[in-house]
Image: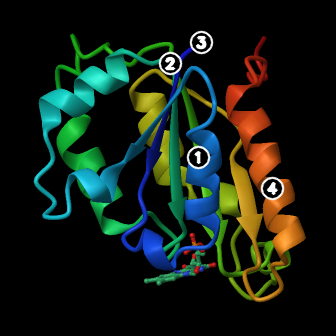
Amino acid sequence: MKTLVIVAHPNLEQSKVNRTWMNRLQQEENVTVHNLYAHYPNFEINVEKEQQLLLEHDRIVLQFPFYWYSTPALLKQWQDVVLTYGFAYGSEGNKLQGKEFMLAISSGGPAEAYQAGGYNSYSMSELTRPLQATANLCGMHFLPSFLLQGMMTLTEERLQESTEALAVYVTNPNLRADR
Ligand SMILES: Cc1cc2nc3c(=O)[nH]c(=O)nc-3n(C[C@H](O)[C@H](O)[C@H](O)COP(=O)(O)O)c2cc1C
């Protein structure tokens, strides 16, 4: 199984979580780490190259910090221009069908804030619905997300634990609930 990890962080020099995750995943065999902001600082995405990368991998992971309950802007732009009619969806747009799709998200707010009655009111599963719906439309299998939440209380130890867990998780071939 070949895994593509698309990293979308606008400021990796100042990142703690996503930079650590990215550096660790780069050591994995059969994992291609693709740093989106490094390739397209001006948001001019090479659609053909991105589609080719998708075709070459079985599992697609979007790794990003949660920004305003969503993805950073370049990752939204990536969705808008790369997941085209006739490629990702539409009567003949079946190129992503059967692939696995996963999110790896860091959030400032802690896990307990993301629930009904909590500070952020909604769960991560609810807030990531547009990406789940996108995966569905493209015929991809949406896998349970990998989360690291609560930046105020994040210790170096918890960051290292999560980083090792992420490396195991993204390469685990048996994540589909329907198998
Ligand atoms: C523009 C912006 C928007 C953010 N929006 C959210 C948000 O909606 N929910 C949240 O929990 N954290 C939010 N955060 C906090 C980031 O998710 C957090 O700092 C990041 O995940 C930490 O990862 P890093 O160390 O790789 O930067 C936001 C941060 C920025 C800069």
Q: Which residue is mark 3?
A: 1
Q: Secondary structure at mark 4?
A: helix
Q: Which quadrant of the frame does ligand 1 lie within?
A: bottom right
Residue, disc 1: 103
Residue at the disc numbered 4: 162
In the image: residue 98, left or right of residue 75: right
Could you tell me how far apart the alpha carbons at marks 2 and 4 are, in whole angstroms? 25 Å
Label 3, label 4: how far apart the Cα atoms are: 22 Å
Dot 2 alpha-carbon crowd within 10 angstroms: few under 14, some 14 to 19, many 20 or more: some
The amino acid type, in three-letter code, at marker 1 is: Leu
Q: Which residue is mark 2?
A: 99
Task: Establish whether ligand 1 lies closer than 8 Å to the Cβ of label 1.
Answer: no
Q: Earlier in the sequence, mark 1 or mark 4?
A: 1
Judge depth for marks 2 and 3 and give the one in front.
3
Label 2 or label 4, whichever lies nearer to me, is: 4
Q: Earlier in the sequence, mark 3 or mark 4?
A: 3
Q: Residue at x 38, y 19 (%)?
A: 96
**Way the structure is coloured:** rainbow
Number of the label disc, if any, that sits on residue 21: none
Alpha carbon distance from label 1 to label 2: 14 Å
- Which is nearer the N-term, disc 2 or disc 4? 2
Query: Residue at coordinates 45% horizontally, 69% vertically from top-left?
Result: 12
Kind of residue at badge 3 = Met
Residue drawn at 75 percent across, 71 percent down = 149
Give SS at disc 1: strand
Count of labels in the image = 4
Number of other residues with Cα within 10 Å of mark 1, as a class: few under 14, some 14 to 19, many 20 or more: many
Q: Earlier in the sequence, mark 3 or mark 1?
A: 3
Note whether residue 88 is visible. Answer: no
Secondary structure of residue under mark 3 = loop
Give me the residue at 56% from left, 39% from top: 26
Cα separation between marks 3 and 1: 17 Å
